[in-house]
Protein backbone atom coordinates (compact mmCIF):
# COMPACT_ATOMS: atom_id res chain seq x y z
CA UNK A 1 0.00 0.00 0.00
CA UNK A 2 2.77 2.46 0.96
CA UNK A 3 4.55 2.02 -2.35
CA UNK A 4 1.31 2.45 -4.27
CA UNK A 5 0.46 5.60 -2.35
CA UNK A 6 3.89 7.08 -2.96
CA UNK A 7 3.64 6.09 -6.63
CA UNK A 8 0.23 7.75 -6.98
CA UNK A 9 1.48 10.96 -5.39
CA UNK A 10 4.68 10.89 -7.44
CA UNK A 11 2.63 10.52 -10.63
CA UNK A 12 0.44 13.44 -9.58
CA UNK A 13 3.47 15.66 -9.02
CA UNK A 14 5.00 14.52 -12.31
CA UNK A 15 1.78 15.38 -14.14
CA UNK A 16 1.72 18.83 -12.59
CA UNK A 17 5.39 19.50 -13.31
CA UNK A 18 5.16 18.12 -16.84
CA UNK A 19 1.92 19.84 -17.79
CA UNK A 20 3.69 22.66 -19.61
CA UNK A 21 5.46 20.09 -21.76
CA UNK A 22 2.61 17.65 -22.32
CA UNK A 23 -0.38 19.91 -22.99
CA UNK A 24 1.07 23.36 -23.69
CA UNK A 25 2.80 24.20 -26.93
CA UNK A 26 6.30 25.58 -26.63
CA UNK A 27 7.41 28.90 -28.05
CA UNK A 28 9.24 28.84 -31.34
CA UNK A 29 12.85 30.07 -31.35
CA UNK A 30 13.37 33.72 -32.22
CA UNK A 31 13.93 34.62 -35.88
CA UNK A 32 17.43 34.02 -37.12
CA UNK A 33 17.10 35.82 -40.42
CA UNK A 34 17.14 32.60 -42.40
CA UNK A 35 15.18 32.32 -45.61
CA UNK A 36 12.92 29.39 -46.46
CA UNK A 37 10.83 29.55 -49.63
CA UNK A 38 7.16 28.75 -49.15
CA UNK A 39 7.35 25.76 -51.49
CA UNK A 40 10.81 24.23 -51.31
CA UNK A 41 10.34 21.13 -49.20
CA UNK A 42 8.53 18.29 -50.87
CA UNK A 43 7.72 17.26 -54.40
CA UNK A 44 4.02 18.06 -54.11
CA UNK A 45 4.78 21.66 -53.22
CA UNK A 46 7.43 22.03 -55.90
CA UNK A 47 4.86 21.09 -58.52
CA UNK A 48 2.25 23.54 -57.17
CA UNK A 49 0.89 26.23 -59.52
CA UNK A 50 2.87 29.41 -59.95
CA UNK A 51 0.35 31.38 -57.91
CA UNK A 52 1.37 29.80 -54.59
CA UNK A 53 2.00 32.33 -51.80
CA UNK A 54 5.47 33.58 -51.01
CA UNK A 55 6.76 36.62 -49.23
CA UNK A 56 9.53 37.49 -51.66
CA UNK A 57 8.85 41.09 -52.63
CA UNK A 58 9.40 41.72 -56.36
CA UNK A 59 11.69 44.60 -57.32
CA UNK A 60 8.91 46.30 -59.27
CA UNK A 61 6.72 46.42 -56.16
CA UNK A 62 9.52 47.90 -54.06
CA UNK A 63 9.94 50.67 -56.65
CA UNK A 64 6.21 51.36 -56.59
CA UNK A 65 6.29 51.62 -52.81
CA UNK A 66 9.23 54.01 -52.88
CA UNK A 67 7.62 56.12 -55.57
CA UNK A 68 4.20 56.40 -53.94
CA UNK A 69 3.33 58.43 -50.87
CA UNK A 70 1.35 56.85 -48.07
CA UNK A 71 -2.08 58.09 -47.02
CA UNK A 72 -4.02 56.94 -43.98
CA UNK A 73 -7.65 56.79 -42.94
CA UNK A 74 -8.81 56.28 -39.35
CA UNK A 75 -12.04 54.54 -38.31
CA UNK A 76 -13.24 55.07 -34.74
CA UNK A 77 -16.01 53.35 -32.86
CA UNK A 78 -16.70 52.64 -29.19
CA UNK A 79 -14.35 49.61 -29.15
CA UNK A 80 -11.37 50.56 -31.31
CA UNK A 81 -9.56 53.11 -33.43
CA UNK A 82 -8.24 51.43 -36.59
CA UNK A 83 -5.75 52.97 -39.02
CA UNK A 84 -5.71 51.84 -42.65
CA UNK A 85 -2.95 52.58 -45.16
CA UNK A 86 -3.05 53.31 -48.87
CA UNK A 87 -0.07 50.99 -49.19
CA UNK A 88 -1.68 47.68 -49.97
CA UNK A 89 -5.10 48.82 -48.77
CA UNK A 90 -4.41 47.10 -45.44
CA UNK A 91 -4.92 47.73 -41.76
CA UNK A 92 -1.86 49.38 -40.22
CA UNK A 93 -2.80 49.36 -36.54
CA UNK A 94 -5.74 49.13 -34.18
CA UNK A 95 -6.10 50.66 -30.72
CA UNK A 96 -8.32 48.67 -28.35
CA UNK A 97 -10.14 51.06 -26.05
CA UNK A 98 -11.25 48.54 -23.42
CA UNK A 99 -7.88 46.88 -22.80
CA UNK A 100 -4.90 48.43 -21.06
CA UNK A 101 -1.23 47.54 -20.93
CA UNK A 102 0.98 47.56 -17.83
CA UNK A 103 1.22 51.34 -18.06
CA UNK A 104 -2.57 51.67 -18.10
CA UNK A 105 -2.49 52.77 -21.74
CA UNK A 106 -4.83 51.34 -24.40
CA UNK A 107 -3.33 48.34 -26.15
CA UNK A 108 -2.30 48.98 -29.75
CA UNK A 109 -1.94 46.01 -32.10
CA UNK A 110 0.24 46.83 -35.08
CA UNK A 111 2.76 45.37 -37.46
CA UNK A 112 5.47 47.34 -39.25
CA UNK A 113 6.42 44.94 -42.00
CA UNK A 114 6.53 44.59 -45.78
CA UNK A 115 3.87 41.90 -45.34
CA UNK A 116 1.05 43.60 -43.40
CA UNK A 117 -2.21 41.93 -42.36
CA UNK A 118 -4.78 41.31 -45.09
CA UNK A 119 -2.16 41.90 -47.80
CA UNK A 120 -3.18 40.66 -51.25
CA UNK A 121 -1.06 39.12 -53.99
CA UNK A 122 -1.00 36.89 -57.07
CA UNK A 123 1.45 34.78 -59.06
CA UNK A 124 4.96 35.24 -57.62
CA UNK A 125 4.10 36.69 -54.21
CA UNK A 126 2.25 39.33 -52.22
CA UNK A 127 3.41 42.01 -54.63
CA UNK A 128 0.43 44.24 -53.80
CA UNK A 129 1.27 44.37 -50.10
CA UNK A 130 2.89 47.78 -50.60
CA UNK A 131 1.17 48.84 -53.84
CA UNK A 132 -0.28 52.40 -53.92
CA UNK A 133 -4.06 52.21 -53.55
CA UNK A 134 -6.38 55.17 -53.99
CA UNK A 135 -8.57 55.77 -50.92
CA UNK A 136 -12.20 56.63 -51.59
CA UNK A 137 -13.70 57.90 -48.36
CA UNK A 138 -12.26 59.61 -45.30
CA UNK A 139 -11.85 59.08 -41.57
CA UNK A 140 -15.08 58.25 -39.75
CA UNK A 141 -16.22 58.26 -36.13
CA UNK A 142 -19.08 55.84 -35.67
CA UNK A 143 -21.85 56.37 -33.12
CA UNK A 144 -25.29 54.94 -32.32
CA UNK A 145 -26.67 57.46 -34.81
CA UNK A 146 -24.05 56.70 -37.51
CA UNK A 147 -23.50 53.00 -36.86
CA UNK A 148 -22.11 51.83 -40.22
CA UNK A 149 -19.51 53.25 -42.61
CA UNK A 150 -17.49 52.03 -45.59
CA UNK A 151 -14.10 52.92 -47.08
CA UNK A 152 -12.94 51.77 -50.52
CA UNK A 153 -9.37 51.22 -51.78
CA UNK A 154 -8.73 51.06 -55.55
CA UNK A 155 -5.67 49.86 -57.48
CA UNK A 156 -4.98 49.26 -61.17
CA UNK A 157 -1.77 48.75 -63.13
CA UNK A 158 -3.42 48.39 -66.53
CA UNK A 159 -3.78 44.62 -66.37
CA UNK A 160 -4.79 43.85 -62.79
CA UNK A 161 -7.56 45.77 -61.02
CA UNK A 162 -8.32 45.48 -57.27
CA UNK A 163 -11.09 47.17 -55.34
CA UNK A 164 -11.31 46.60 -51.59
CA UNK A 165 -14.32 47.80 -49.60
CA UNK A 166 -14.21 47.71 -45.80
CA UNK A 167 -17.46 48.13 -43.87
CA UNK A 168 -17.32 49.01 -40.17
CA UNK A 169 -19.96 48.75 -37.45
CA UNK A 170 -20.56 50.52 -34.18
CA UNK A 171 -20.27 48.25 -31.12
CA UNK A 172 -18.45 45.48 -33.00
CA UNK A 173 -14.88 44.36 -33.70
CA UNK A 174 -15.96 42.50 -36.83
CA UNK A 175 -15.26 44.23 -40.14
CA UNK A 176 -16.81 43.21 -43.46
CA UNK A 177 -14.42 43.13 -46.42
CA UNK A 178 -15.35 42.77 -50.08
CA UNK A 179 -12.62 42.26 -52.68
CA UNK A 180 -13.26 42.70 -56.40
CA UNK A 181 -10.26 41.38 -58.35
CA UNK A 182 -9.87 41.06 -62.12
CA UNK A 183 -7.02 40.39 -64.53
CA UNK A 184 -5.75 37.22 -62.81
CA UNK A 185 -7.31 33.76 -62.32
CA UNK A 186 -6.89 33.77 -58.52
CA UNK A 187 -5.25 35.66 -55.65
CA UNK A 188 -4.07 35.18 -52.06
CA UNK A 189 -4.77 37.01 -48.79
CA UNK A 190 -2.45 36.66 -45.81
CA UNK A 191 -2.77 37.63 -42.17
CA UNK A 192 0.84 38.78 -42.17
CA UNK A 193 3.55 37.96 -39.68
CA UNK A 194 2.01 37.46 -36.22
CA UNK A 195 -0.14 40.58 -36.51
CA UNK A 196 -2.13 41.15 -33.35
CA UNK A 197 0.47 39.61 -31.07
CA UNK A 198 0.46 41.69 -27.90
CA UNK A 199 2.58 39.47 -25.65
CA UNK A 200 4.32 36.20 -26.44
CA UNK A 201 3.76 33.83 -23.53
CA UNK A 202 5.54 30.48 -23.38
CA UNK A 203 2.55 28.89 -21.64
CA UNK A 204 0.24 29.31 -24.64
CA UNK A 205 0.34 29.02 -28.41
CA UNK A 206 0.98 32.00 -30.65
CA UNK A 207 0.95 31.94 -34.43
CA UNK A 208 -1.35 30.57 -37.15
CA UNK A 209 -4.56 28.70 -36.38
CA UNK A 210 -6.90 27.06 -38.91
CA UNK A 211 -10.39 25.75 -38.19
CA UNK A 212 -10.91 22.88 -40.61
CA UNK A 213 -14.31 21.26 -40.23
CA UNK A 214 -14.44 20.77 -36.44
CA UNK A 215 -10.68 20.58 -35.91
CA UNK A 216 -8.67 23.45 -34.46
CA UNK A 217 -5.19 23.20 -36.03
CA UNK A 218 -2.38 25.35 -34.67
CA UNK A 219 1.18 25.70 -35.93
CA UNK A 220 4.60 26.86 -34.79
CA UNK A 221 7.34 27.93 -37.17
CA UNK A 222 9.75 25.47 -35.52
CA UNK A 223 7.41 22.58 -36.38
CA UNK A 224 6.68 23.64 -39.98
CA UNK A 225 9.29 21.57 -41.77
CA UNK A 226 7.11 21.68 -44.88
CA UNK A 227 4.05 23.73 -45.87
CA UNK A 228 0.62 22.53 -44.78
CA UNK A 229 -2.15 22.81 -47.38
CA UNK A 230 -5.93 22.45 -47.11
CA UNK A 231 -8.41 22.36 -49.97
CA UNK A 232 -11.73 21.78 -48.22
CA UNK A 233 -13.54 22.34 -44.94
CA UNK A 234 -11.75 25.55 -43.90
CA UNK A 235 -14.01 27.75 -41.76
CA UNK A 236 -11.47 30.48 -40.89
CA UNK A 237 -7.78 31.29 -40.56
CA UNK A 238 -6.20 33.30 -37.75
CA UNK A 239 -3.03 34.57 -36.11
CA UNK A 240 -3.28 34.42 -32.33
CA UNK A 241 -1.55 35.14 -29.08
CA UNK A 242 -2.70 34.61 -25.49
CA UNK A 243 -5.53 37.14 -25.39
CA UNK A 244 -5.86 38.70 -28.90
CA UNK A 245 -6.04 37.54 -32.49
CA UNK A 246 -6.72 38.55 -36.08
CA UNK A 247 -8.76 36.37 -38.39
CA UNK A 248 -10.35 36.04 -41.80
CA UNK A 249 -13.63 34.15 -42.16
CA UNK A 250 -14.62 33.57 -45.83
CA UNK A 251 -18.27 33.98 -46.74
CA UNK A 252 -17.79 31.88 -49.87
CA UNK A 253 -15.63 29.02 -51.18
CA UNK A 254 -11.88 28.89 -50.62
CA UNK A 255 -9.55 27.40 -53.24
CA UNK A 256 -6.76 26.59 -50.82
CA UNK A 257 -5.28 27.51 -47.45
CA UNK A 258 -1.58 27.26 -46.83
CA UNK A 259 0.56 27.53 -43.67
CA UNK A 260 4.33 27.77 -44.09
CA UNK A 261 7.58 28.90 -42.49
CA UNK A 262 9.29 32.07 -43.69
CA UNK A 263 12.44 33.19 -41.87
CA UNK A 264 11.22 31.47 -38.67
CA UNK A 265 7.84 33.19 -38.94
CA UNK A 266 4.79 30.95 -39.34
CA UNK A 267 2.51 32.45 -42.01
CA UNK A 268 -0.99 31.59 -43.16
CA UNK A 269 -2.79 32.60 -46.36
CA UNK A 270 -5.97 31.73 -48.26
CA UNK A 271 -6.47 31.58 -52.04
CA UNK A 272 -9.66 32.69 -53.81
CA UNK A 273 -10.82 32.73 -57.41
CA UNK A 274 -10.86 36.19 -58.91
CA UNK A 275 -14.11 38.07 -59.06
CA UNK A 276 -16.07 39.27 -56.04
CA UNK A 277 -15.35 37.66 -52.67
CA UNK A 278 -16.54 38.64 -49.20
CA UNK A 279 -15.09 37.92 -45.77
CA UNK A 280 -15.50 38.82 -42.13
CA UNK A 281 -12.36 40.21 -40.51
CA UNK A 282 -11.82 40.25 -36.76
CA UNK A 283 -8.96 41.94 -34.95
CA UNK A 284 -9.38 42.13 -31.21
CA UNK A 285 -9.83 40.24 -27.94
CA UNK A 286 -10.77 36.61 -27.40
CA UNK A 287 -14.12 37.37 -25.79
CA UNK A 288 -15.96 34.05 -25.79
CA UNK A 289 -19.53 35.40 -25.66
CA UNK A 290 -18.90 37.89 -28.47
CA UNK A 291 -17.25 35.30 -30.71
CA UNK A 292 -20.13 32.86 -30.25
CA UNK A 293 -22.56 35.46 -31.60
CA UNK A 294 -21.01 35.27 -35.07
CA UNK A 295 -22.01 31.58 -35.45
CA UNK A 296 -18.86 30.82 -37.45
CA UNK A 297 -17.01 28.69 -34.89
CA UNK A 298 -14.72 31.64 -34.18
CA UNK A 299 -15.01 30.95 -30.43
CA UNK A 300 -12.80 27.88 -30.97
CA UNK A 301 -9.83 30.18 -31.36
CA UNK A 302 -9.93 30.01 -27.55
CA UNK A 303 -8.11 26.78 -26.75
CA UNK A 304 -9.24 25.31 -23.42
CA UNK A 305 -6.86 22.41 -23.89
CA UNK A 306 -7.10 18.66 -23.45
CA UNK A 307 -9.87 18.89 -20.85
CA UNK A 308 -11.96 21.44 -22.76
CA UNK A 309 -15.07 19.30 -22.24
CA UNK A 310 -14.73 20.17 -18.53
CA UNK A 311 -13.23 23.65 -18.95
CA UNK A 312 -16.05 25.15 -21.03
CA UNK A 313 -18.83 24.34 -18.54
CA UNK A 314 -16.63 25.57 -15.68
CA UNK A 315 -16.02 28.80 -17.59
CA UNK A 316 -19.74 29.27 -18.20
CA UNK A 317 -20.57 28.75 -14.51
CA UNK A 318 -17.74 31.06 -13.46
CA UNK A 319 -19.10 33.86 -15.65
CA UNK A 320 -22.60 33.24 -14.32
CA UNK A 321 -21.43 33.79 -10.74
CA UNK A 322 -19.49 36.86 -11.82
CA UNK A 323 -22.63 38.41 -13.26
CA UNK A 324 -24.27 38.00 -9.85
CA UNK A 325 -21.45 39.17 -7.56
CA UNK A 326 -19.09 41.14 -9.86
CA UNK A 327 -15.92 39.64 -8.37
CA UNK A 328 -14.12 36.78 -10.09
CA UNK A 329 -12.25 35.86 -6.90
CA UNK A 330 -15.48 35.29 -5.00
CA UNK A 331 -16.85 33.50 -8.08
CA UNK A 332 -13.87 31.12 -7.97
CA UNK A 333 -14.55 30.40 -4.27
CA UNK A 334 -18.20 29.59 -4.99
CA UNK A 335 -17.28 27.50 -8.05
CA UNK A 336 -14.68 25.53 -6.05
CA UNK A 337 -17.27 24.77 -3.37
CA UNK A 338 -19.82 23.59 -5.93
CA UNK A 339 -17.25 21.47 -7.81
CA UNK A 340 -16.33 19.89 -4.49
CA UNK A 341 -19.88 18.72 -3.75
CA UNK A 342 -19.90 15.71 -6.17
CA UNK A 343 -16.65 14.50 -4.62
CA UNK A 344 -17.90 14.63 -0.99
CA UNK A 345 -19.13 10.98 -0.82
CA UNK A 346 -16.01 9.71 -2.57
CA UNK A 347 -13.68 11.76 -0.39
CA UNK A 348 -15.56 10.67 2.70
CA UNK A 349 -15.18 7.00 1.79
CA UNK A 350 -11.51 7.59 1.06
CA UNK A 351 -10.98 9.20 4.45
CA UNK A 352 -12.80 6.37 6.20
CA UNK A 353 -10.70 3.87 4.29
CA UNK A 354 -7.51 5.60 5.33
CA UNK A 355 -8.71 5.62 8.94
CA UNK A 356 -9.37 1.87 8.84
CA UNK A 357 -6.02 1.33 7.20
CA UNK A 358 -4.36 3.16 10.06
CA UNK A 359 -6.20 0.99 12.58
CA UNK A 360 -5.01 -2.29 11.03
CA UNK A 361 -1.44 -1.03 10.64
CA UNK A 362 -0.13 -3.04 13.65
CA UNK A 363 -1.58 -6.24 12.20
CA UNK A 364 -0.01 -5.43 8.81
CA UNK A 365 3.36 -4.96 10.49
CA UNK A 366 3.04 -8.39 12.10
CA UNK A 367 2.26 -10.03 8.76
CA UNK A 368 5.21 -8.34 7.09
CA UNK A 369 7.53 -9.54 9.81
CA UNK A 370 6.07 -13.06 9.85
CA UNK A 371 6.23 -13.57 6.08
CA UNK A 372 9.22 -11.42 5.17
CA UNK A 373 10.92 -14.41 3.56
CA UNK A 374 7.84 -15.27 1.49
CA UNK A 375 6.66 -12.12 -0.38
CA UNK A 376 3.87 -13.92 -2.20
CA UNK A 377 2.38 -15.30 1.01
CA UNK A 378 2.77 -11.90 2.68
CA UNK A 379 0.88 -10.19 -0.16
CA UNK A 380 -1.88 -12.78 0.02
CA UNK A 381 -2.29 -12.38 3.77
CA UNK A 382 -2.37 -8.60 3.54
CA UNK A 383 -5.04 -8.73 0.83
CA UNK A 384 -7.09 -11.04 3.04
CA UNK A 385 -6.70 -8.52 5.84
CA UNK A 386 -7.95 -5.75 3.57
CA UNK A 387 -10.90 -7.87 2.57
CA UNK A 388 -11.76 -8.79 6.14
CA UNK A 389 -11.82 -5.18 7.31
CA UNK A 390 -13.32 -3.85 4.04
CA UNK A 391 -10.38 -1.57 3.34
CA UNK A 392 -9.57 -0.17 -0.11
CA UNK A 393 -5.81 0.58 -0.14
CA UNK A 394 -6.25 3.06 -3.01
CA UNK A 395 -9.31 4.73 -1.52
CA UNK A 396 -7.35 7.71 -0.22
CA UNK A 397 -5.61 8.40 -3.54
CA UNK A 398 -8.59 8.09 -5.86
CA UNK A 399 -10.31 11.39 -4.93
CA UNK A 400 -7.10 13.33 -5.60
CA UNK A 401 -6.56 11.63 -8.95
CA UNK A 402 -10.15 12.30 -10.03
CA UNK A 403 -9.74 16.00 -9.24
CA UNK A 404 -6.68 16.37 -11.49
CA UNK A 405 -8.75 16.85 -14.71
CA UNK A 406 -10.79 19.55 -12.94
CA UNK A 407 -7.54 21.17 -11.80
CA UNK A 408 -6.11 21.24 -15.34
CA UNK A 409 -9.40 22.44 -16.83
CA UNK A 410 -9.65 25.32 -14.38
CA UNK A 411 -5.95 26.04 -14.89
CA UNK A 412 -6.60 26.65 -18.61
CA UNK A 413 -9.69 28.75 -17.88
CA UNK A 414 -7.77 31.01 -15.52
CA UNK A 415 -4.71 31.09 -17.78
CA UNK A 416 -6.22 32.09 -21.12
CA UNK A 417 -9.60 33.72 -20.42
CA UNK A 418 -9.32 37.40 -21.25
CA UNK A 419 -12.31 38.00 -18.96
CA UNK A 420 -9.99 37.32 -16.00
CA UNK A 421 -7.18 39.46 -17.37
CA UNK A 422 -6.76 42.30 -14.89
CA UNK A 423 -9.67 41.04 -12.76
CA UNK A 424 -9.08 42.09 -9.12
CA UNK A 425 -9.92 40.06 -6.02
CA UNK A 426 -9.00 41.78 -2.76
CA UNK A 427 -6.33 44.17 -1.49
CA UNK A 428 -3.01 43.24 -3.13
CA UNK A 429 -4.42 40.89 -5.80
CA UNK A 430 -5.24 43.07 -8.79
CA UNK A 431 -5.06 40.40 -11.51
CA UNK A 432 -6.33 36.86 -10.99
CA UNK A 433 -4.68 35.73 -14.23
CA UNK A 434 -1.22 36.68 -12.91
CA UNK A 435 0.82 35.32 -10.03
CA UNK A 436 0.34 36.67 -6.52
CA UNK A 437 2.89 39.54 -6.34
CA UNK A 438 3.25 39.13 -2.57
CA UNK A 439 3.22 35.28 -2.64
CA UNK A 440 0.73 35.28 0.24
CA UNK A 441 -1.74 32.87 -1.37
CA UNK A 442 0.87 30.21 -2.33
CA UNK A 443 2.40 30.28 1.15
CA UNK A 444 -0.98 30.01 2.87
CA UNK A 445 -1.87 27.23 0.44
CA UNK A 446 1.33 25.37 1.44
CA UNK A 447 0.43 25.75 5.12
CA UNK A 448 -3.01 24.26 4.53
CA UNK A 449 -1.38 21.31 2.78
CA UNK A 450 0.77 20.68 5.87
CA UNK A 451 -2.30 20.86 8.13
CA UNK A 452 -4.20 18.54 5.82
CA UNK A 453 -1.39 15.98 5.89
CA UNK A 454 -1.14 16.16 9.67
CA UNK A 455 -4.85 15.46 9.98
CA UNK A 456 -5.04 12.69 7.38
CA UNK A 457 -4.66 9.16 8.77
CA UNK A 458 -1.63 7.37 7.40
CA UNK A 459 -0.31 3.84 7.43
CA UNK A 460 3.20 4.94 6.50
CA UNK A 461 6.20 4.55 8.76
CA UNK A 462 7.80 7.71 10.25
CA UNK A 463 10.45 7.93 7.52
CA UNK A 464 7.87 7.79 4.76
CA UNK A 465 5.75 10.41 6.52
CA UNK A 466 8.74 12.76 6.63
CA UNK A 467 9.23 12.21 2.91
CA UNK A 468 5.60 13.08 2.31
CA UNK A 469 6.11 16.42 4.04
CA UNK A 470 8.20 17.44 1.04
CA UNK A 471 5.00 17.64 -1.01
CA UNK A 472 3.75 20.93 0.48
CA UNK A 473 7.15 22.48 -0.17
CA UNK A 474 7.17 21.28 -3.79
CA UNK A 475 3.62 22.46 -4.41
CA UNK A 476 4.27 25.83 -2.78
CA UNK A 477 7.23 26.55 -5.05
CA UNK A 478 5.26 25.37 -8.08
CA UNK A 479 2.33 27.63 -7.24
CA UNK A 480 4.48 30.73 -6.76
CA UNK A 481 4.30 31.41 -10.50
CA UNK A 482 0.78 30.09 -11.11
CA UNK A 483 -2.17 32.44 -11.71
CA UNK A 484 -3.41 33.67 -8.35
CA UNK A 485 -6.92 32.57 -9.30
CA UNK A 486 -5.70 28.99 -9.60
CA UNK A 487 -3.90 29.19 -6.25
CA UNK A 488 -7.11 30.54 -4.75
CA UNK A 489 -8.97 27.53 -6.11
CA UNK A 490 -6.43 25.10 -4.63
CA UNK A 491 -6.40 26.93 -1.28
CA UNK A 492 -10.20 26.83 -0.97
CA UNK A 493 -10.17 23.18 -1.98
CA UNK A 494 -7.64 22.44 0.79
CA UNK A 495 -9.76 24.29 3.37
CA UNK A 496 -12.81 22.28 2.34
CA UNK A 497 -10.75 19.06 2.64
CA UNK A 498 -9.59 20.07 6.12
CA UNK A 499 -13.19 20.72 7.15
CA UNK A 500 -14.35 17.37 5.83
CA UNK A 501 -11.40 15.54 7.42
CA UNK A 502 -12.13 17.19 10.77
CA UNK A 503 -15.71 15.96 10.56
CA UNK A 504 -14.56 12.41 9.66
CA UNK A 505 -12.04 12.31 12.51
CA UNK A 506 -14.58 13.62 15.01
CA UNK A 507 -17.15 11.07 13.85
CA UNK A 508 -14.59 8.25 14.20
CA UNK A 509 -13.59 9.45 17.68
CA UNK A 510 -17.21 9.46 18.86
CA UNK A 511 -17.74 5.99 17.44
CA UNK A 512 -14.62 4.69 19.19
CA UNK A 513 -15.76 6.23 22.51
Image (cartoon, rainbow, N blue to C red):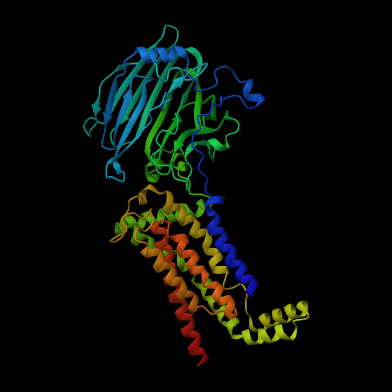
User: What is the residue that sits farthest to the top in this orientation?
Assistant: 158
Residue at (61% x, 21% y) in the render:
48
Location of residue 72 in the rendering, given as x and y in whole percent from the top left corner: 29, 22
Foreground residue among 123 and 405: 123
User: What is the residue that sits farthest to the left in this orientation?
Assistant: 145
Q: Is residue 199 visible?
A: yes
Based on the displayed image, in which of its 4 quarters is residue 389 positioned?
Answer: bottom right
Foreground residue among 30 and 504: 30
User: What is the residue that sits farthest to the front in this orientation?
Assistant: 32
Residue 453, compared with residue 49, is above or below; it is below
Residue at (32% x, 25% y) in the render:
84
Residue at (74% x, 80% y) in the render:
378
Location of residue 498 in the rendering, given as x and y in whole percent from the top left corner: 44, 75
Quadrant where the N terminus is found in the figure: bottom right
Location of residue 56 in the rendering, given as x and y in whole percent from the top left corner: 50, 20
Location of residue 319 in the rendering, given as x and y in whole percent from the top left corner: 37, 54
Foreground residue among 257 and 438: 438
User: What is the residue that sits farthest to the bottom in this orientation?
Assistant: 513
Total tally of numbered discs in the picture: 0
Q: Is residue 212 visible?
A: no
Amino acid sequence: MEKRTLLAITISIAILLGYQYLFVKQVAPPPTGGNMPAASVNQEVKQAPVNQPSVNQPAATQKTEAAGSESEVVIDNDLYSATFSSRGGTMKSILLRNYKDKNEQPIVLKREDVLPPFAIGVNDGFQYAQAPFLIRGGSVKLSPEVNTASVTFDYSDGSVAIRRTYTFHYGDYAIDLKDEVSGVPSYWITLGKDYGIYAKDSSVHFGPVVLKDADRLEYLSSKLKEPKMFKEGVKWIAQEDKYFFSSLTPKGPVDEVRVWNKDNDALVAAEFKSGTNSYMLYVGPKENDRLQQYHTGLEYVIDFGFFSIIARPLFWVLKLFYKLIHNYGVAIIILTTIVRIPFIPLVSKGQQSMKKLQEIQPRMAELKEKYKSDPQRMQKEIMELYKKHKVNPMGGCLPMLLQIPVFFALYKVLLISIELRGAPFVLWIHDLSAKDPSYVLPIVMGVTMVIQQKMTPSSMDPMQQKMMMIMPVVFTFMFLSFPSGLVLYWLVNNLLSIGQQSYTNLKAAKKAA
